[in-house]
Amino acid sequence: MRQPAHGGNLAWAAALADCPPDAILDFSASISPLGPPSSAIAAIVSQLSNLRHYPDPNYSELRLALSHFHQLPPEWILPGNGSAELLTLIGRELSQLAATMLMTPAFGDYYRTLAVHNAKVLEFPLDLGARELGVRKQGGQKRDVFLSSPHLPIPASQGCGLLLNNPHNPTGRLFSRESILPYLEQFALVVVDEAFMDFVPPDEEQSLISVVPEYGNLVVLRSLTKFYSLPGLRLGYAIAHPDYLTKWQLWRDPWPVNTLAAAAAIAALEAQEFQEQTWKWLPPARNQLFQGLTDLPGLQPENSAANFLLVESKQSTSQLQQKLLKQHQILIRDCLSFKELGDRFFRIAVRSDTDNQRLLAALKLVLSAEC
Ligand SMILES: Cc1ncc(COP(=O)(O)O)c(C=O)c1O
């Protein structure tokens, strides 16, 4: 079986660990351990009898719920079959420009969609050594928030696109809204993938959604996969000028979002208690995991605004991954598919306290056996 280029490949991990897939403790996919919200599951069950009907092709109810959630007119919002589906449409849009600037290391699916549409790609690496670039600011509840800037060069030609990810996967860096805004004057189209922005509490978030109506060249992508733990349901949405969204709708199949996903999404957006619980849970859980990793020999995690940590390792990460799998049935995300990171980095999701402690104990054993 081939090495996966994405987290969460349990069949591959189980074959290596010689155990059933559900025995694997999965730190490789950055999915919240708190969800899905029970109201989303209840909404799915309540809609089972409606499976005999087609979904509303305009997703009016879902768009209205998203419109209330983001305080934007429904015509500016397009739901999709996960944000991956919308990335495919955006790749086609970007391919019509002179080139697309891609901040790297980048989520692998960006390469897929840009390549499939023959888009010209200009890669611009983040300064991985510059951890100190993060400006420490006092966030809500007197927490430290690390805000950084992508520091991208201005494109040589007019008419280029820019594809950014905020918070950034795999580093977890959070770019300030102010550091991205100038790019809207310099690029023909700016796409900001905010798949992990929900994890940043409201008083610290840096979303560009509120400025979409001011910029006809801005697209923001969101996903319900990570925050609401719904990767199997497939629900994401794009926020952009209606002219783009109307065109993209013609580029795709009808009914990309099924009835159950639409109902679950509406319930999830209304699950305020779940949202608050997540914002309360994540910062201390992430800090504790961060501290535990820092205390282990040869490991250095990055500050992260998301529900995962990128960790630099003095030892080969693929060997570490194999040992954790075979000896402890724990799966971490190696970073071999991010060519800028290679075998010296791994990424882990923040999970429950019990799971995080299990990972730290396993890492301690594996690393001490190496010394
Ligand atoms: C940065 C980023 N964007 C988008 C996605 C795709 O999410 P979805 O499940 O909504 O297609 C992922 C999934 O790993 C991701 O990491």
Image (cartoon, grey):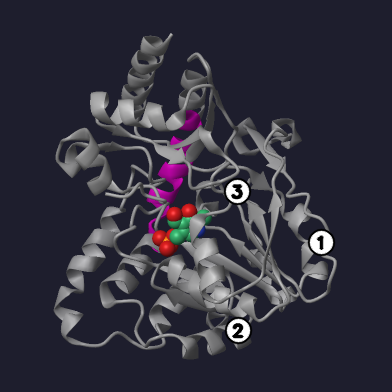
Q: Give percent across and percent down for residue 204.
A: 63, 46
- Residue carrying label 1: 182
Q: Which mark is residue 155?
A: none
Pick whichever of labels 1 and 2 is earlier in the sequence. 1
- Residue carrying label 2: 244
Is the C terminus in the top left, top right, bottom left or bottom right quadrant?
A: top left
Spatial separation of the CA atoms under disc 1 and disc 3: 22 Å
Q: Residue extending furthest front? A: 1
User: Given the image, on which type of amino acid does mark 2 rest?
Assistant: Tyr
Which SS type dominates the magenta stretch? Answer: helix
- Residue carrying label 3: 105
For mark 2, give the secondary structure.
Answer: helix
Vertical side of 71 occupied by 165: above or below = above
164 vs 298, nearest the viewer: 298
43 vs 241, nearest the viewer: 241
For mark 1, give the secondary structure.
Answer: loop
Magenta stretch bounds: 270-286
Pick whichever of labels 1 and 3 is earlier in the sequence. 3
User: Given the image, on which type of amino acid does mark 1 rest?
Assistant: Pro
